[in-house]
Image (cartoon, rainbow, N blue to C red):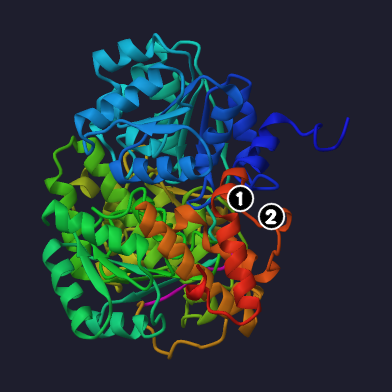
């Protein structure tokens, strides 16, 4: 038996269909669980290839795989990408006319389709379920699965009905995939969707190629322009809190000669779709948007995400910055925040049409994000710790590259931790601050906390100062915020060590930087080998060719080939189909459909003929 024949079926499909020699980290265990007929919840970083887990599994298992997706645009892009890879995929959705949907269903019913993409609203109708239960459904995949959980950052009531899928398809394994789920959200998904009968795979949350930075807003427009000056001609997203600000920032950037477009839910659908298409297919576009833009946006070469206002939670922030650098190359996530948008976020939570329990948790999530903004040590440590990941200082965030001035906080830290301990580790920051400042509230008097040794011990500090210190104690791992409970503060092992003088604590008094940003490169930025001059010229020609082919087919450019594939192509300079098949991301279908075109472009570039001149 040859080595080629000995390849397992999933790895053969990985190579021949998708053009990959090996799985990325975290993918293979999920595939093996699904192939063994087990349910799986996969929490994987954005850009880590979650979709490939169910796509490979679907092709190995045969029959029909149903894919639940929240957005029409995402369905279209994934179906287009699968078809270019030679996979029979379909979508039935409201954006297509009836005849298109009928024709797609006939192909599904005839057994010609391997993957069918549906929105939850369409899947969970009686008529669709009745029709699908008559077909050989072998796998169900639910993308953006955090939408199922009311604790997730993008809860959609229509997703809740998916909890009934196991009744309609009792012997069909279900895959739930998301990049955004803390412990509470994971447990909620597992309970609702699987009745806790599933394997949970958490592949880590780190995106080390994204540089993280946060600063207080002083002059937002000037800070944004200064940031964009470091990214000339690059694609990126600028997130704004309101529709009005989205329009004004987009207009301001356009007047400054930056190719910016607005996107928000209040725009005409035609204009909104046109702007999204331009962003996805044209190089160097900057999308100025509310959070209406983003879920399912899979553009690999987004070089930055700039938050002009504070996001709603750590989960939302993580999801939004995850749209940058999906090609693995250096990217930046930069956030401005101020008191006004903290106040507005509080108002949004209070106005939300939900129960007191959810509002309470959302306030706690916002507190965690503010703690991240005020972190005095490695920002990535704070972000990953929130999701339960441990990490070393990253060397690729503002606090690592430009350390802030810190104040010795052992005394105030011990005072705060002592107040938490003496009150039973069940109260939130508001009550703890009242105890520290000696405020005789009704709660303090009724509980007898006015007689504690810590009552009034920190009266010389303001409420705002104590709020910041407590947030930094949370961010530093000395205190834990009970998000699933009632927001009580708990002292961690590190906190216990601080109380016993076995740990130190330093804090920042404010977050306004006092030093100019350093220009030194991070370790990770330096680790990416640059292309030489000749390869850069060829890469530019290949990108132009890719854009032309994408426009001809009406798909985003990355669906033809990713930037990573083009970079590998430019460096390898393959001269025949065998060598072209070795390029990262080139499967059998893309070799057939695009091999000759790109080989000719490379050959012409090598002999000095511009790629655009190639017939």
At x 33%, y 12%, the residue is 131
User: Which class describes the residues within 10 Å of circle 2: few (<14), some (14-19), or many (20+)?
Assistant: few
At x 46%, y 70%, the residue is 544
Q: Which residue is farthest bottom?
A: 516
x then y, percent, for residue 234: 40, 75
At x 29%, y 17%, the residue is 128
User: Which class describes the residues within 10 Å of circle 1: few (<14), some (14-19), or many (20+)?
Assistant: many
For residue 550, which quarter of the picture? bottom left
Residue 442, above or below 320? above
Q: Element under label 1?
A: helix
Residue 158, above or below 95? above
Q: Are marks 1 and 2 in contact (CB under 8 Å)?
A: yes
Q: Which mark is residue 577?
A: 2
Residue 558, above or below 525? above
Residue 466 is a magenta residue? no
Q: Which of 314 and 231 is in front in this view?
A: 231
x then y, percent, for residue 157: 24, 31
For residue 231, which quarter of the picture? bottom left
Query: Which residues, given as a range, are shown in magenta?
Result: 503-509
Q: Quadrant of the N terminus?
A: top right
Q: Element under label 2?
A: helix
Q: Nearer the viewer, residue 330 or 426?
A: 330
Q: Which of 544 and 204 is in front in this view?
A: 544
At x 25%, y 55%, the residue is 291
Tell me which numbered mark, 1 or 2, is placed earlier along the sequence: 2
Q: In the displayed structure, does residue 331 sit left or right of residue 530?
A: left
Q: Which mark is residue 591?
A: 1
x then y, percent, for residue 338: 24, 71
Q: Is residue 353 visible?
A: yes
Q: Residue 169 carries which label?
A: none
């Amino acid at each position: 038996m040859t080595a080629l024949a000995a390849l397992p079926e999933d790895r053969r499909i990985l190579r021949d269909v998708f053009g990959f020699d090996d799985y990325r980290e975290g993918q293979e265990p999920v595939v093996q669980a699904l192939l063994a007929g087990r349910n799986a919840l996969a929490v994987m970083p954005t850009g880590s290839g979650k979709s490939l887990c169910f796509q490979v599994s679907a092709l190995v298992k045969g029959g029909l795989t149903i894919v639940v997706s929240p957005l029409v645009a995402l369905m279209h892009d994934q179906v287009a990408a699968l078809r270019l890879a030679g996979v029979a995929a379909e979508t039935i959705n409201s954006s297509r006319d009836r005849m298109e949907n009928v024709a797609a269903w006939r192909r599904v019913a005839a057994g010609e389709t391997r993957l069918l993409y549906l929105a939850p609203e369409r899947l969970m109708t009686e008529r669709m379920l009745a029709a699908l239960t008559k077909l050989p459904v072998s796998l169900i995949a639910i993308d953006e699965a955090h939408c199922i959980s009311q604790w997730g950052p993008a809860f959609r009531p229509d997703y809740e009905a998916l909890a009934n899928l196991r009744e309609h398809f009792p012997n069909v394994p279900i895959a739930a995939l998301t990049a955004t789920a803390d412990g509470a959200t994971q447990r909620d998904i597992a309970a609702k969707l699987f009745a806790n009968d599933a394997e949970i795979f958490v592949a880590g949350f780190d995106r080390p190629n994204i540089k993280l930075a946060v600063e207080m807003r002083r002059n937002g427009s000037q800070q944004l322009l200064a940031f964009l000056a470091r990214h000339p001609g690059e694609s990126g997203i600028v997130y704004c809190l309101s529709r009005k600000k989205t329009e004004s920032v987009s207009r301001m950037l356009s007047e400054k000669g930056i190719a910016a477009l607005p996107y928000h839910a209040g725009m005409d659908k035609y204009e909104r779709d046109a702007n999204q298409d331009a962003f996805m297919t044209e190089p160097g576009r900057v999308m100025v948007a509310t959070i209406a833009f983003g879920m399912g946006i899979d553009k690999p070469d987004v070089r930055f995400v700039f938050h002009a206002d504070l996001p709603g939670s750590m989960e939302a922030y993580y999801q939004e910055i995850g749209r940058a650098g999906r090609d693995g190359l250096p990217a930046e996530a930069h956030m401005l925040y101020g008191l006004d948008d903290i106040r507005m976020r509080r108002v949004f939570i209070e106005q939300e049409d939900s129960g007191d329990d959810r509002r309470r948790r959302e306030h706690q999530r916002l507190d965690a994000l503010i703690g991240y903004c005020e972190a005095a040590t490695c920002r990535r440590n704070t972000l990953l710790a929130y999701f339960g990941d441990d990490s070393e200082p990253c060397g690729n965030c503002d606090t690592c590259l430009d350390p802030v001035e810190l104040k010795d906080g052992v005394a105030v830290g011990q005072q705060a931790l002592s107040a938490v301990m003496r009150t039973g580790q069940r109260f939130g920051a508001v009550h703890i601050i009242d105890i520290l400042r000696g405020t005789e509230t009704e709660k303090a008097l009724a509980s007898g906390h006015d007689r504690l040794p810590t009552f009034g011990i920190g009266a010389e500090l303001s409420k705002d100062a104590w709020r910041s210190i407590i947030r930094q104690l949370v961010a530093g791992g000395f205190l834990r915020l009970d998000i699933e409970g009632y927001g009580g503060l708990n002292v961690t092992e590190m906190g216990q060590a601080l109380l016993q003088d076995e740990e130190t604590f330093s804090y920042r008094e404010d977050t306004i930087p006092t030093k100019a940003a350093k220009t030194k490169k991070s370790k990770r930025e330096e680790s990416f080998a640059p292309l030489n001059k000749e390869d850069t010229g060829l890469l530019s020609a290949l990108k132009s060719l890719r854009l032309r082919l994408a426009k001809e087919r009406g798909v985003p450019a990355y669906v033809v080939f990713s930037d990573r594939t083009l970079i590998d192509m430019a460096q390898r300079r393959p001269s025949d189909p065998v060598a072209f098949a070795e390029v990262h991301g080139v499967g059998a279908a893309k070799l057939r459909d695009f091999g000759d075109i790109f080989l000719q472009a490379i050959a012409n570039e090598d002999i000095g003929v511009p790629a655009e001149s190639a017939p």
